[in-house]
Image: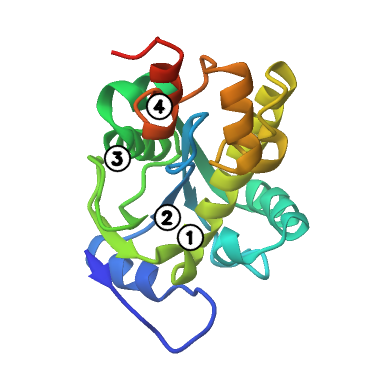
């Protein structure tokens, strides 16, 4: 695991180049979206960027506006290799959110159209991969490849939650994307727990217990 700080304010290829020197090319960046919400899947994405065609303005998805993320999403899809892995609520509840996230990351890497020589993982843990991997805390603000993965993961999951919101109105998933907002909490109390809620998460467990559905 690497805890790295660098003087530039935006991500670059520094960490990709270090891995390339040791393991060769290409290097994939891997990130996830949706570890904290009370509902919905966790989505992981692996991205291999073409250094000659890097979309301008790549950064940690949390630092970008929704409009900017959408624009970059289209550019990344058009210029890079992308793989996506999705861990559903059943897996999250069975294995716990960390293990489900690592599984989704592995799936995302294996879904790439070409096998990377190495991978940069946002965070402090590496999934089981078929290539060497380096964990990079804050990687979405340091590595262009991880930043690109963060954008694809965020947009992919947001779109999934917006579709789920149409089928399950009342929880404001179209706005909160399953996170624990006041609207979501009120919806849980009023409407109860759906099949898309993470029953292993304490706020959902509390509602189940109140409704006599808990263990």
> Which of the two discs, 3 and 2, sits closer to the camera?
3
In the image, taking residue 177 as reference, residue 110 lies left or right, namely left
Q: Which residue is mark 4?
A: 206
- Identify the mark nearer the N-term, 2 or 1: 2
SS at circle 4: helix
- Identify the mark nearer the N-term, 3 or 2: 2
The picture places residue 21, in percent across and down from the top left corner, at: 28, 70
- Identify the mark nearer the N-term, 4 or 2: 2
- Characterize the local packing of mark 4: few (<14), some (14-19) or many (20 or more) Cα atoms within 10 angstroms: some
The picture places residue 136, in percent across and down from the top left corner, at: 32, 64
- Identify the mark nearer the N-term, 1 or 3: 3
Q: Are marks 4 and 2 in contact (CB under 8 Å)?
A: no
Residue at the image position 69 percent from the left and 56 percent from the top: 69
Q: Are marks 2 and 1 in contact (CB under 8 Å)?
A: yes
- Residue 176 in the image: above or below residue 39: below
Q: Which residue is mark 1?
A: 145
SS at circle 1: helix
């Amino acid at each position: 695991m690497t805890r790295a700080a660098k003087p530039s304010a935006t991500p670059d290829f520094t960490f990709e180049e270090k891995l390339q020197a040791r393991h060769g090319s290409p290097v994939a960046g891997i990130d996830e979206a949706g570890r904290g919400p009370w509902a919905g899947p966790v989505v992981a994405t692996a991205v291999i960027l073409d250094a000659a065609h890097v979309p301008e303005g790549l950064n940690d998805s949390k630092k970008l506006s929704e409009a900017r993320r959408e624009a970059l999403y289209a550019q990344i899809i058009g210029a890079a290799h992308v793989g996506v892995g999705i861990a559903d609520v059943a897996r999250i509840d069975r294995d716990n959110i960390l293990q489900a996230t690592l599984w989704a990351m592995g799936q995302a890497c294996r879904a790439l159209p070409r096998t990377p020589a190495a991978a940069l993982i946002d965070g402090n843990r590496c999934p089981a991969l078929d290539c060497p991997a380096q964990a990079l805390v804050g990687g979405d603000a340091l590595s262009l490849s991880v930043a690109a993965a963060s954008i694809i993961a965020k947009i992919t999951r947001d779109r999934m939650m917006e579709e789920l919101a149409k089928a399950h109105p009342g929880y404001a998933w179209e706005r909160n994307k399953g996170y624990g907002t006041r609207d979501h909490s009120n919806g849980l109390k009023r409407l109860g727990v759906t099949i898309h809620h993470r029953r292993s998460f304490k706020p959902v467990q509390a509602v189940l217990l109140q409704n006599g559905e808990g263990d």
